[in-house]
């Protein structure tokens, strides 16, 4: 077992049962012209964490631990897009509409792909998810069970939407969850702070938080 001096208290984990989940580091959320920008958000905030997420992924790869990537996207025929989700946001550019990086949040389109700096390595799992949470309508639970994973480290965007939703899903399924504070971001700094506060409140009610340096040095150390 290893221990990280996390918040609100130490996070102990067996590296052999630990995986990194990198949520939705997609061009549609991080680059101009995508879904995030179409909703009126400043995407530069999210772009800034790309190197930090890359450092965390690199540490997991060096330690030989699983890295799992997710992408929020839908089938081209929109059969997995609920009417209620389609109707949200700004009418100017909705999911499935043609944008500068192809159809917004559609599997196989350039915008739905992970930013090139963080592309999945050969053999790494990439989960396409139609919801905000990565367990909903995906094989994630079965994949983690097959790998005997009990502890999850989270990175990605956005902190209060897909990262928090997935962390809560995982927490309810019995995983111990740690959020890498500086490898996650929101279009709204106050939402990121509130999410981190609520995750670790009440004795880690959703999980723990720590920095990429803390997590990386713990998993790389012998
Ligand atoms: C959003 C996400 N914010 N990946 N998706 O719609 O957080």
Image (spheres, rainbow, N blue to C red):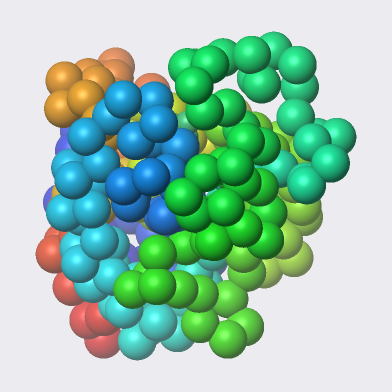
Camera-nearest residue between 183 and 209: 183
Residue shown at 64%/14% (left/top)? 87
Residue 82, visible in the rendered structure: yes
Query: Which quadrant does the N terminus fall into?
Result: bottom left
Residue shown at 42%/55% (left/top)? 27
**Which x, y percent locates residue 173?**
63, 36
Residue shown at 47%/62% (left/top)? 114
Residue 204, visible in the rendered structure: no
Residue shown at 75%/65% (left/top)? 146
- Quadrant position of residue 14: bottom left
Horizontally, residue 48 falls left or right of residue 2, namely left
**Which x, y percent locates residue 156?**
37, 49
Camera-nearest residue between 75 and 93: 93
- Quadrant position of residue 133: top right
Horizontally, residue 146 falls left or right of residue 176, namely right
- Quadrant position of residue 29: top left
**Which x, y percent locates residue 125?**
62, 69
Does 208 appear above or below 212? Answer: above
Does 24 appear above or below 61? Answer: above
Horizontally, residue 66 falls left or right of residue 80, namely left
Query: Which quadrant does the C terminus fall into?
Result: bottom left
Horizontally, residue 149 falls left or right of residue 163, namely right
Camera-nearest residue between 104 and 56: 104
**Which x, y percent locates residue 206?**
41, 28
* Total numbered labels: 0
């Amino acid at each position: 077992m290893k221990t990280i001096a996390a918040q609100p208290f130490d996070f102990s984990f067996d590296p052999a049962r630990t995986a990194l989940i990198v949520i939705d580091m997609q061009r549609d959320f991080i680059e101009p012209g995508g879904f995030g920008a179409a909703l009126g958000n400043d995407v530069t905030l999210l772009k800034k964490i790309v190197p930090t997420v890359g450092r965390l992924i690199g540490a997991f790869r060096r330690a030989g631990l699983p890295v799992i990537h997710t992408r929020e996207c839908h089938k081209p025929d929109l059969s997995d897009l609920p009417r209620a989700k389609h109707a949200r946001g700004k009418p100017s550019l909705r999911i499935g509409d043609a944008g500068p990086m192809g159809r917004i949040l559609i599997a196989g389109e350039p915008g739905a792909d992970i930013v090139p700096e963080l592309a999945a390595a050969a053999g790494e799992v990439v989960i396409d998810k139609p919801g905000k949470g990565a367990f909903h309508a995906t094989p994630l639970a079965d994949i983690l069970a097959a790998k005997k994973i009990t502890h999850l480290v989270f990175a990605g965007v956005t902190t209060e939407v897909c990262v928090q939703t997935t962390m809560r899903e995982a927490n309810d399924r019995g995983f111990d969850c740690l959020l890498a504070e500086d490898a996650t971001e929101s279009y709204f700094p106050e939402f990121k702070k509130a999410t981190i506060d609520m995750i670790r409140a009440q004795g880690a009610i959703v999980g723990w938080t720590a920095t990429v340096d803390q997590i990386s040095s713990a998993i790389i150390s012998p």
